[in-house]
Image: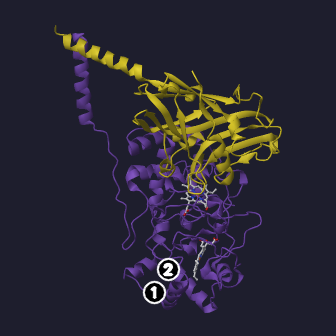
Amino acid sequence: MRKAGILGLTAMVLLMIISWMNPPKKPHPIKFPIPKGWPQPLYDFKSNPLTEEGFALGKKLFYDGRLSKDNQISCGTCHQQFAAFTTFDHPLSHGFNNQQTTRNAPSLQNLAWQSNFMADGGITHLDLQPLAPITAENEMAETLENIIAKIKADKEYAKLFQAAYGNANINTQRIGKALSQFMLLMISSNSKYDKVMLGIDSFSLPEKLGYGIFQNKCASCHPAPLFTDNQYRNAGLPQDEVLKDLGRMRITNQSADSLKFKVPSLRNIALTAPYGHDGRFFALSNLFEHYRKQMVLGPTTDPQFSNRLPLSNFEIGQLKAFLNTLTDSVFIKDPRFSELGITNAPGNHGH
Amino acid sequence: MKYLLQYLLLLLLGLCAFSEAQTQQSISFQHMMGNQALVLDDSLQNSHGEKLVVRRFKYYISNLVLIDEQGNRQAYPDNYYLVNEAEPSSKKIVLPNAPKNYSVIEFLLGVDSARNCSGIQTGVLDPMQGMFWTWNTGYVFAKLEGAAPSSGLPAHAFTYHIGGFRTGENVLKTIRLAIPGRSLPKDLQVKVDINTWFSGTNTLLIADRPVCHSPGALAMKFAANYAQMFSIIQP
């Protein structure tokens, strides 16, 4: 009894000394940078404090093909950095077994300022967003059980989870939070437009004229600094006969929401062709033709479009010049978000 | 003498454990189709005369409260239960620290809206449990799947995934059951009658309605029905 007591005590003291000499490494916090003049982000950082280790884990997950059934399709396959994280030059993206998505992949940027995701706003938390592509048969077609099993089999991940969370437990919540950490820091705020607003650059004449037209005709739905009001609106795109996409109505079941889609951000718009929720507009010129001539006015079309959106050829030229100033070349080359240096990442798909 | 304190401590611990055991109550759910016990993949019949087999039957229970005659409430706000026919242990809910003198038991059939709206949860609320809509954020509160000759779907399947917490499509149901004798037995037996899904407030035939996969009007009809599925079996 006495011996056991002494032994126990020594063990305890030893343990204390060891932990004092070798304290558990705390992850290094990252302060979320809010660009000057921007509103407060909507993401609740208290529930998922940003750390360098969490970000690194999220990055590895984002570029890991093992999140899909055939181990080939990562988030980065459809969300490509050089195209502001859309799928370059694809109306719809390719998923598992040569299937296609039913919508155009949006750019991933400034996600901390959004509270609802997808073109119909069906997903109400960024942490939950990855579950949709992971489990969708036409995207990554994988189960959460399998992903967790694959991740657990990789010692590298054990280290990353340990570093980010203090232990190597792996669960859905931790995967979602880490992916959010990576995506939350994808902030695009370094375009020419931003520099002009900060007074460190200036518009050319066409850009300046375009900015004026934009303020008049576009900013009501695409307001700065995010270039979206995050509302659901019908911009007069008739329903595609194959996709039969009802937009927001799919979520709310309200006929008043039929054919309404989330107003997309116009940041990096020059890099994200094709356009529209199903990528039906090959180039900006097609979209402008739609706005001024082809728009179909139905019961839920936005009242601002009661006369469609009249635009002269001249105006279109100036608008394009302005929209080009929204390209953020720092963002699309930022090594923090790039696939380079990531192991196990499948290459960009080409065909 | 030296060890007296230790012995006393041990005794105290033992007493604590003993009294704990005394107040530990449980609720057991017995899944039935009418008066027939549910056996997965076994032939059953609903009160419309439709033959069917059930392959999956699971539902969430949360916000459990025990209420005594004086209105005192013992609440378990942080406990979420996923009762699953395929996992016998999940059909018994253990309630620690529950004295016997309760006369009413109340719980939500489903997951309260707060937990629907706060990101990825863990444990029984982990989306991995297959009770979560990934494309339209929210939990499936109750799931009933199987096959019936009357279903016109491939393989004569029927699948009901019932959920919805937003205004206009809320199917969260508060279930309130009076405890017979105003005293909680050690293991309260609750009958859960699947037949109520098809008849009750709304008459729903598998033949007409083999699928319900999203919140909305049909889900609300099913939920209005299944809100009646619980009843306490008299001891």
Looking at this view, is A118 or A145 the one in front?
Answer: A118
Q: Please name the residue shown 83% across and 40% down the image.
A: B150
Label 1 residue SS: loop
Q: Which residue is mark 1?
A: A203
A91 displayed left or right of A242: left
Q: Residue at coordinates 22% horizontally, 21% vertically from top-left? A: A10
Quarter of the image with the N terminus of chain B in it: top left
Q: Residue at the location (49% across, 59% down)?
A: A338
* Total residue callouts: 2
Category of crowding for the residue at label 2, using alpha-carbon neighbours closer than 10 angstroms: few (below 14), some (14–19), many (at least 20): many
Question: Residue under mark 2: which chain is it in?
Answer: A
Residue A70 showing in the rendered view:
no
**The C terminus of chain B appears in which quarter of the rendering?**
top right
On screen, residue A230 versus residue B31, left or right, reads: left
Q: Front-most of B93 and A59?
A: B93
Q: Nearer the viewer, residue B9 or A191?
A: B9
Q: Which label belongs to residue A325? A: 2
The yellow one among the chains is B
Quadrant of res A14: top left
Can see residue A82?
yes
Q: Compared with residue A211, is residue A185 higher up or lower down, i.e. above or below?
A: above
What is the letter of the purple chain? A
Ranked by sequence position, the earlier of labels 1 and 2 is 1
Q: Is residue B80 left or right of residue B57?
A: left
User: Which amino acid type is shown beneath numbered disc 1?
Assistant: Phe
Q: Is residue B156 above or below residue A103?
A: above
Are discs 1 and 2 less than 8 Å apart at CB?
Answer: yes
Q: Position of residue B174 (x, y in %)?
A: 54, 43
Asked which colour scheme the image uses, the reply is by chain
Q: Are marks 1 and 2 on the same chain?
A: yes
Question: Percent position (x, y) of residue B34?
Answer: 71, 30
